[in-house]
Amino acid sequence: MLLQLGEIPTLIISSADMAREIMRTHDLIFASRPLLKNAEILLYGRMDMAFSPYGEHWRQLKKLCTIHLLSTKRVQSYQLAREEEVAFMVKNITQCSLLHAPIDMSEVLFSFVNDNICRLVSGKFLREGGRNHFFRKAIEEIVILLGGFRVEDYFPSLAWLEGWFLGLSKRARRAFKIWDDVLDEVIKEHENRDKDDGEEDFVDVLLSLQKDPNMDFELKKEHIKAILVIHRAYSWLVGHLGTQEYCYLHDYARSISRHLQDQAADGPVDDNRSRLIGFYMN
């Protein structure tokens, strides 16, 4: 099905046969993402892997992330960091329970996922001094801008409206400036600290690769920043969507549990249903 979204013809894949044509037969033609103005602004001219056009540059970035950042050995090396984040989350829950304060599990789980991935990407830097709360709001703005609607993306001939009336380019550049300053500070802190002090995070790995003469392409500072921005945006999405699903399931299980308890007052409850609810609640 072909839709005309503004001035842009957009192909909608609505069958398995068409999906096969797009994903296998003509995959090279459809491999690149469409050019989005906000991605151009926020990701240093699309120097990341997610929005970079398909080609040699994209293949080198994919190879870098697959081998050096997301390999099995690298993920396993972060086990201690993950365990510390779990302990930190449990400690916060325990403190709330001792004070008989209500616990927002959605917020607790979101913070856990967000802080965990944040620590793997840039170490403990963003948590120090309560920075993580500020940067979480900043990355929310990045995610909104990357996924938001821009007139220019669908009506290229009306691009002048953005600057004169809507101000989205100014908003995107303001968000870019905040994160660019943050990443400069993160990179500077990693360059100046003792290499043997603390765990090795994504920034450490990327900085070491930047100095590696055997690299197949020149890894610029802008590449590092773009990779860090997209990883932080991804962590926000994982934290937001993943914990939201869990909380929906948890609330649903609690409502059924209450229903079964009400039924138990009037008569016996089926054991299979009780075991099922117990599985989800534990």
Image: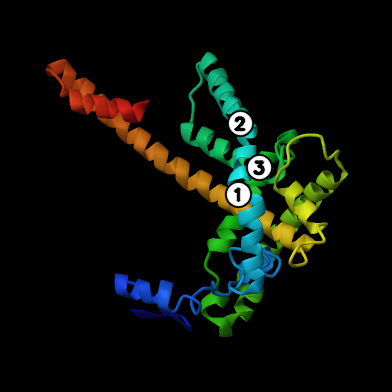
CA gap between label 3 and label 1 equals 13 Å
Q: What coloring was used for the rendering?
A: rainbow
Q: Residue 154: percent from the left, percent from the top?
A: 51, 77
Q: Look at mark 3 in the image and give the residue it sits on.
A: 120
Q: Tag 2, which secondary structure?
A: helix
Q: Can residue 167 be seen by looking at this rendering?
A: no
Q: Residue 219: percent from the left, percent from the top?
A: 76, 63
Q: Residue furthest top?
A: 98
Residue at 58 percent of width and 22 percent of height: 91
Q: Look at mark 2 in the image and give the residue it sits on.
A: 85
Residue at 85 percent of width and 40 percent of height: 193
- The three-letter code of the residue at mark 2 reads Glu
Question: Quadrant of the rendered structure where residue 190 is?
Answer: top right
Q: Tag 1, which secondary structure?
A: loop
Q: Quadrant of the C terminus?
A: top left
Residue placed most toward the observer, 42 or 202: 202
Q: Residue 97: percent from the left, percent from the top?
A: 51, 17
- The three-letter code of the residue at mark 1 reads Ser
How many numbered marks have been drawn onto this rendered protein structure? 3
Q: Residue 17: percent from the left, percent from the top?
A: 31, 74
Q: Look at mark 1 in the image and give the residue it sits on.
A: 71
Q: Can residue 31 be seen by looking at this rendering?
A: yes
Q: Earlier in the sequence, mark 3 or mark 1?
A: 1
Q: Compared with residue 96, is residue 198 higher up or lower down, i.e. above or below?
A: below
Classed neighbour count for the residue bearing mark 3: other residues with Cα under 10 Å, few (<14), some (14–19), many (≥20): many
